[in-house]
Amino acid sequence: MANSFDQTLDVKGAKCPMPLVKSRKAIADLTVGQVLKVVATDRGSVADFQGWAKTAKNVELVAQETEQEGGQDLYVHYLKRTS
Amino acid sequence: MTIEMSETFDTQTLLERINALESRVNELEAHPAQGIEDRVAMVVFSGELDKAIAAFIIATGAASMGLEVSMFFTFWGLNAVKKQKIFTGKDLLEQGFTAMLPGKLGETGLSQMNFFGAGAQIIRGLMRKHDVSSPEELFGLAQELGVRMVVCDMSRELLGVRDAELVDGLETGGVATFLGDAARAKVTLFI
């Protein structure tokens, strides 16, 4: 089942810590309950977003998936703003 | 948990214990600063580029995760938050230190494999090639994200560094400034 989301953030090419920094800004622009879809190429972002969701009080990691695009791996994260 | 059946319920004693508990709770609530916060407190003691990069990446990452971040720049760490060199109004020894030390982050070298600055340039080139934000961008981002940056005044004086040589927007403090934040932090680092 495809995950639903309200906003998409493209951080392809961005390296640590930029996917996190940009997502944090994008999440702040959402209203509570909305979901942000983050598309990254940084492999470390998979564990990074898990760590963030574990630490943060206002973010829930709904799902993570890996996609292929033009021979490169895309790491897709769905983050819900919870407060 | 076992209950002492032989112990009789003395209302007076119970009330006293409740009162004691209440005053303890009030006391703790009046001093929330004593509790642990979602904070990272860092001592940036080293002034080399690679260590500064590590410090600023941790700071920006932590701030993005919603953690409060405090950075304390002391001793060689001051190199990471300088913006220029000033020689006027300094004594000979201070001028010597100024001449020998980097005048800004862009002049700092690596802690290993520096090769008189060539190593630092190679690392900067690699960071560009791999689309990693530059050390200067990371520093600006840290400020933007509200990272608290405190300069140790004692080491600033010791090394003859003037306020005008430091980046704008820094606080001044001492060891207690660090410990005040570190004692309440979940993460403390010495870089």
Image (cartoon, coloured by chain):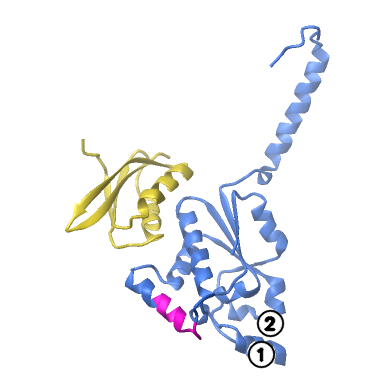
Q: Colour of chain A?
A: yellow
Q: Is residue B156 above or below residue B29?
A: below
* Position of residue B65 in the picture relative to residue B69 (left or right): left
| Residue at screen point 46% across, 57% down | B61
| Residue at screen point 54% across, 53% down | B68
Q: Give the quarter of the figure containing the N terminus of chain B.
A: top right
Indicate the amino acid at tag 2. Gly
- Label 1 resides on the chain identified as B
Label 1 or label 2, whichever comes before in sequence order:
1
* SS for dot 2: loop
Q: Which chain is blue?
A: B
Residue B108 appears at what percent x and percent y? 52, 79
Q: Give the quarter of the figure containing the C terminus of chain B.
A: bottom right
- Whole-Å distance between the Cαs marked 1 and 2? 8 Å
Q: Which residue is mark 1?
A: B95
Residue B2 appears at what percent x and percent y? 71, 14
Instruction: Determine whether label 1 and label 2 are within 8 Å by CB.
Output: yes
Residue B104 appears at what percent x and percent y? 53, 80
Which numbered circle lies on residue A32?
none
Which numbered circle lies on residue B160?
2
Q: Is residue A1 above or below residue B48?
A: above
Indicate the amino acid at tag 1. Gln
* SS for dot 1: helix
Q: Is residue B20 above or below residue B2?
A: below
Residue B155 sits in quarter: bottom right
Residue B167 sits in quarter: bottom right
Judged by its main secondary structure, the magenta piece is helix
| Residue at screen point 35% across, 49% down | A46
Whether residue B171 appears in this view of the structure is yes
The span shown in magenta is B115-124
